[in-house]
Amino acid sequence: MQSDLWERAVTYAAIGATQAPDLLRHPPAGYRPLERIARIGHGQARYDYAWQTALTWGIQRTSGFRVTLTDAPPEVGEASYTPISFDAGGQPIAPATITDADEVVYDANGARLLAPGDTALLGIGLGITFPVRVIYVVDEPRRRGFAYGTLPGHPEDGEESWMIDHRDDDSVWITIRAFSRPANRWWWAVYPALRIMQEYYTRRYLRALAGPIS
């Protein structure tokens, strides 16, 4: 039974560390860092399509995962890490979409945008699921994305983020960052297979938002 999944804490201590500028040089002790960046198009339409897809679990679904959301009380989000963004002058950047922590926000197609504290099971068939929780959401006019952390039952411990950037030259990019390690001795025994699987899905993530805009 997974009805109590929302009650479980994430399986690592460095919550929010995918935001660290020096993640690749100084990852949390014992964890392997990862970063991949790809251009996925240009223009406002591509950016809107990309960030709305990202914030409705579309990257995961397009990459082959079945996403099953689990109910959680609103207070679960209170312990989530939600970074404050600042501009070059040091002034806080007002959220572009999410105006209230208790407000449910939807994209142009009526799909609910994910929020810190959301908990989900990512399935790949054969009964294999990966429980995760949304740790933070970035919601700026030209940069949007989110990160999730692993929950008990996931083969790895760690965090992964997906950020969509609309740059000054009108190009649109996705950045994937993560730090992870096998969750237990059994998964350490098959660590090479885990790394192959991670790389496989990372490549699929990079291609997930480059398709046609409907």
Image (cartoon, rainbow, N blue to C red):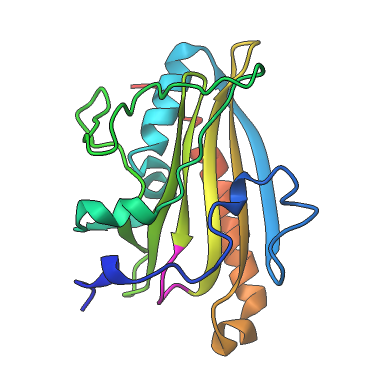
Q: Is residue 137 left or right of residue 37?
A: left
Magenta-drawn stretch, dominant element (helix, strand or loop): loop
Q: Is residue 145 left or right of residue 200?
A: left
27 or 101: which is nearer to us?
101
User: Quadrant where the N terminus lies?
Assistant: bottom left
User: Quadrant where the C terminus lies?
Assistant: top left
Q: Residue at x 23, y 73 (%)?
A: 4
Q: How many marks?
A: 0
Q: Residue at x 41, y 75 (%)?
A: 152
Q: Residue at x 75, y 52 (%)?
A: 24
- Residue 2 image offset from top left, x and y in percent: 23, 74
Q: Residue at x 34, y 24 (%)?
A: 97
55 up-or-down from 152: above or below: above
- Residue 61 image offset from top left, x and y in percent: 36, 48
Residue 19 visible in the snapshot: yes
183 up-or-down from 43: above or below: below
**Quadrant of the rendered image containing residue 139:** top left
Q: Is residue 188 left or right of residue 122?
A: right
> Looking at the image, which residue sits at the far right?
25
Q: Is residue 112 left or right of residue 168?
A: left
- Residue 175 image offset from top left, x and y in percent: 61, 38
Is residue 35 on the magenta stretch?
A: no
Residue 117 visible in the snapshot: no
140 up-or-down from 138: above or below: above
- Residue 140 image offset from top left, x and y in percent: 48, 24
122 or 81: which is nearer to us?
81
42 up-or-down from 73: above or below: above
**Quadrant of the rendered image containing residue 72:** bottom left
What span is colored magenta in the figure? 150-154
